[in-house]
Amino acid sequence: MRNVKNLILLVLVFGLVLSACAPKPTPTPEPTATLEPTPIPPTETPVPTEVPTIEVQGTEEPVEESQPQAGERYHVSDGGFSYIIPEGWTLADFPGLKYKILASDKLVDGVMPNLVFVDSPLVGNLADSLDSLEAGLTQMQPNFKVLSIDQGQTKQGHEYYRLTATNETNGMKMTQVQYYFDLGGTMLVITYSTGLQDTPENEAMIEQFIQDVQFEE
């Protein structure tokens, strides 16, 4: 179980700390010219002069973009949607995914609850696409068992389909809830994965999370 936990954590942070370091070239010293002594002519008594005062103005340091915190709305500028980050959840990049994911800091039945956002071209209507995806998921993942499919609506008035299923991967049993949104030619799928027996707190959180999702008009 410890190996599974460590593997999930490593995958979440993979690619965030990798950086390339290249050795810097050592500058070649230039030859120094030999200076011959020059006779110094007599000088008159110097007259004191005022030294000009130079006012040094401070330079503004670049401000780094702060990472959104729990309770704040995060705008996915290249996706045209936004959501509020739940308490105890963190944004993270994930290799191979276009959008950042959200990961909880508390495991449920050995599974790290997470939210993944994926979009794809929409062919036909949303119901037809959902049927095709359901068939494909069942074929690719024999342990993917659909429990229910229903419909809902966000506070903004965006309708969606909700597919609830159980799944098992590498011996880990989990519950997965997928939310399908029609964005007009594009389909956004929000997948919530958690342990097989989710907590009441997480169940309430995900429903509130989906209600607060907004799309740019």
Image (tube, rainbow, N blue to C red):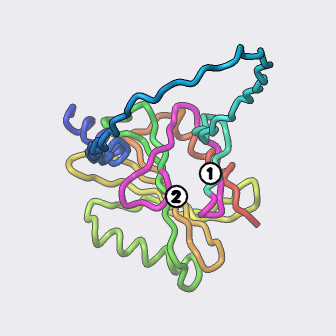
The quadrant in which residue 124 appears is bottom right
Foreground residue among 93 and 188: 93
Location of mark 1 (residue)? 210
Residue 173 visible, this orientation: no
Give the magenta range: 77-100
How many neighbours does mark 2 have within 10 angstroms: few (below 14), some (14-19), or many (20 or more)? some
**Amino acid, disc 1:** Ile
Residue with the mark numbered 2: 190
Give x and y (percent) for residue 100: 49, 52
Near-viewer residue (200 or 211): 211
Sequence order check, earlier mark of 2 and 1: 2
Residue 143 vertical position relative to residue 203 in the rendered view, above or below = below
How many marks on residues? 2
Q: Residue at x 64, y 38 (%)?
A: 63
Q: Is residue 133 left or right of residue 24?
A: right
Q: Which mark is residue 168?
A: none
Q: Are marks 2 and 1 in contact (CB under 8 Å)?
A: yes
Instruction: Please tell me whether mark 1 sits on a helix, a strand or a loop.
Output: helix
The kind of secondary structure the magenta stretch mainly shows is: loop
Residue 171 at least partly seen:
yes
Q: Secondary structure at mark 2?
A: strand
Q: Is residue 50 above or below residue 211?
A: above
Residue 111 part of the magenta-drawn span: no
Left/right placement of residue 208 relative to residue 192 reads: right
Percent across and percent down for residue 70 are 60, 34
For the point 62% across and 51% down, which residue is it? 210
Above or below — where is 48 with respect to 71? above
